[in-house]
Amino acid sequence: MNITETEAASTKKNRIYNIIYAIMVVFFILMLIWAAVGNRGQSPAALLSEGNIAFDEGWYLEDGSAADVGHLSKIPSVVPYQEQSVYHRLPDDLEEGISLCFRSKNIDYQVYVDGELRYEPVRRESRVYNKSYGNRWNYVPLYRSDAGKVLEVRFHTVYEGGRACVDHLYLGSAAGEIVGTFSSKAVAFSTCLLILFVGLLLIVADIPANMQMHKNHELLYLGLFAISIVVWCLAETSLLQFFTDDSRLIQLMSCCALSMIPIPLVLYLDAAFGFKGRTVVPIVCGLSAAEFVVCTVLHFTGVMDYHETLILSHIMLAISVFLLLYSILNKVFREGIGRMRNVYKVLRIIGFVGLSFAALIDIIRYYRGSTNDNAMFVRIGLLIFILCYGSSSLERVINAVKLGVQSEFVSQLAYRDGLTGIGNRTAFQERLMELEKEKQQLPGIAIMMFDVNDLKLVNDNLGHQKGDELLVCSAEIIKTAVESMEGTCYRIGGDEFVGILCGEDVAGRCEKVVTCFTKAMADYNAVKGQPFHISIASGYAVYDKLQENEVLMDVYQQADVRMYENKKIIKAKKGSYS
């Protein structure tokens, strides 16, 4: 049996084992579902909270009028910052071990039983904190002797016009309500931890993914974006209180996390899609940083805390969401529907759209006065987003991990000039083809041509080793000048070099390159005892978007012509030959 037949037999055996294992897995899952459906019972949370009764009805004000404790700020007699009380009579059959369980939002409060202070949350003071406790779960112990007594919640709202409430009111087992809270938030909390893990994974994956010649920190920015959102989502679950008991710190974390979202998002969009205008990224990042500084100054001066300036964070988020949708639509229309059939591209668009609409829904819910979880839909949208993007990026990241070191080595061989260490003709040609596809989206493109004079003279009179030294020195001068203006440099022939500059004001930057390498040549030639004199001719041309049929190869040829014109001028000045 030859090698091919052996491999085929091995593959056939593996296929059989795969089928057997798949049958085992399916059987195991069906067995679990059968057992779960046929033996459903009460959950531990339901057992612990059995007998708990809702206690949100029947509250009244001092004058006897009914009080809607779920919307304290809407009660006409409630004045911001002024103390007020709501009352409720405890049942006559109150049992031992019962607690008053409730959630408070944006109020300072104490709980009294027949005028006796029974509960007051520990108030940690710091200039860092907001004015409010934020969302806080409370469990007030009651006793059999409290039966029939008047329960009073004395409070004052801490924000004018802010949502203030006391809700999720129950009389019963505090342990049952705590377990019930964890059960109801378990999926949300687990989703947050999953997204946090994925965000960290994306940041780590950015390292091998960028072991290539052209860096792109798309994964890094995506990871930072996911983490900044998930920090806010974790705070909004209100479960962190059970780990720290410092709800003011959690509210501060929630408010500040919103300010951290726009910058990584816009940097990611620029890396993934690119913006036509080079001013979009600095404007959005600058506005986001300015918003954070303004909010911080207002907070620490006591004018308005972070919660009161949330409107500014929401505006920045709205701008970011608009850019998100614009980038997606622009990508679709730029490439055309026919070219968007790639399943991974479709998945990315679904993820982006899902996250955008989820964020908009939660912002609308917030301003409509929802007192429930403000990150409910964002978590769902973010999970869809991460799953869609993760699917589309998985192959690229795995290949980057497998081939990172190897591709760097191959790149050195295939795209680097062996003598000077800069890019070679192949690298230049590939870069030119890339730019040809992107030229309409770039602010400007310039091509610079360089030719080292007197190479033949040095080779004939001083030997080829000195000729090589002349090329290496000239390459270093050209490379330093071009890279000082954020360009890239290539050796495309024996004594010919080319530079490419992209972005804003490429013509002005080309002039600075010429000034830079002219000064470097003069400095080299001014040193006594140099084995040779360095003279380099140059010329550049700029791509003109207004000429519809112009291609970059035409720009390259224009730069070449101007370089030879400069070469003639240099020869005429010194009256010698190349």
Image (cartoon, helix red, strand yellow):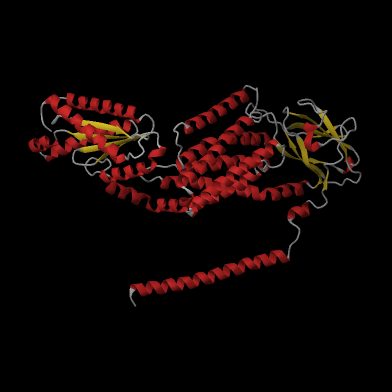
- Position in image of residue 109 (x %, y %): 77, 32
Q: Residue at x 87, y 47 (%)?
A: 95
Residue furthest bottom as drawn: 1
Q: Is residue 96 left or right of residue 299?
A: right
Q: Is residue 473 visible?
A: no
Residue furthest left as drawn: 461
Up-down relation of residue 324 to residue 63 (above or below)? below
Q: Is residue 451 left or right of residue 274?
A: left
- Position in image of residue 376 (x %, y %): 66, 45
292 or 443: which is nearer to us?
443
Name the quadrant of the N terminus.
bottom left
Q: How many marks?
A: 0
Up-down relation of residue 4 to residue 69 (above or below)? below
Name the quadrant of the C terminus.
top left
Q: Is residue 182 left or right of residue 504?
A: right
Residue 149 in which image quadrant:
top right
- Position in image of residue 291 (x %, y %): 57, 28
Q: Is residue 179 visible?
A: yes
